[in-house]
Amino acid sequence: MGQTYKLAEHFISINGEGQLAGELALFLRFAGCNLRCSYCDTLWACGKDAPHEVVSLSRIVDIAKDAIENGVRNVTLTGGEPLLQPGINDVIGRLTALGLQPEIETNGAIPLKDFCAPCRPKFTMDYKLPSSRMEQHMCTENFALLHEWDTVKFVCGTRADVFRAKEIAELYKPSCPLYLSPVFGQIEPAEIVEIMKEQKMTRFRLQLQLHKFIWDPMERGV
């Protein structure tokens, strides 16, 4: 069977966040994560005992071909943490060869240098702020590897998180778009906007998780 992957779920939906928000995509959610963020909304997919299907690369290719037949051109690899999957570069390469545009949603605690060749995906990288309780795990050297088609996402649960996001942006000066994303139900988006105005945070964009407004916030497969 060769290299296998722990696939927790796959489905077609709209991107809820980032530069491709609102566009249809194939989602491949992989099981397992090296972080435990306080606000994690996919905790069910993170543990060692997370429900998953063990699949081959050919099975992933078949899933992707079905999506292409339905007109989908974007594919989002998410988790958990997809970059923990051994052989994930092979998945990225095959998806690219099929004509899909891979996007990796990664938690910021994995060095990206090993995933920039031979087929470089788009990275949507988190920077974990203090309320996540995971900031100490961030690989800040990743900022130097990001391009304008990548994204940095700052998930904010408190006012202090918003100020910290501004500090990080000023310190590392990433060249890609920067998004502030409120933790659903913990901080009001309007409060973040007020801070953005007060602090002249013109480099940032506020984003809301579209899927949590369209469907039940805890719904899977959307």
Image (cartoon, grey):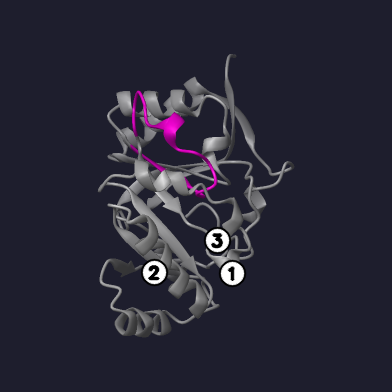
The residue to which callout 3 is attached is: 219
The residue to which callout 1 is attached is: 131
Left or right, residue 191 beside residue 32: left
The amino acid on which the numbered mark 3 sits, given as a three-letter code, is Glu
Left or right, residue 54 beside residue 142: right
SS category of the residue bearing label 3: loop
- Name the residue rendered at 34%, 27% in the picture: 119
Q: Position of residue 196 (x, y in %)?
A: 33, 78
Quadrant of the rendering where the N terminus is positioned: top right
Q: Which of marks 1 and 3 is nearer the N terminus?
A: 1
Q: Please report the bounds of the magenta region as a residue range.
A: 102-120
Query: How far apart are the two marked residues, 1 and 2, measured between alpha carbons?
Result: 15 Å
Q: Can you see residue 15?
A: no
Query: How far apart are the two marked residues, 1 and 3, measured between alpha carbons?
Result: 24 Å
Q: Can you see residue 101?
A: yes
- Name the residue rendered at 48%, 65% in the picture: 155
The amino acid on which the numbered mark 1 sits, given as a three-letter code, is Ser
The amino acid on which the numbered mark 2 sits, given as a three-letter code, is Lys
The residue to which callout 2 is attached is: 166
Q: Position of residue 66 (x, y in %)?
A: 38, 32
- Name the residue rendered at 32%, 85% in the picture: 198
Query: How far apart are the two marked residues, 3 and 2, measured between alpha carbons?
Result: 32 Å
Between 170 and 106, the one lying in front of the other is 170
Q: Of the residues tagged 1 and 2, which is closer to the observer?
A: 2
SS category of the residue bearing label 1: helix
Q: Which of marks 3 and 2 is nearer the N terminus?
A: 2
Quarter of the figure with residue 49: top right
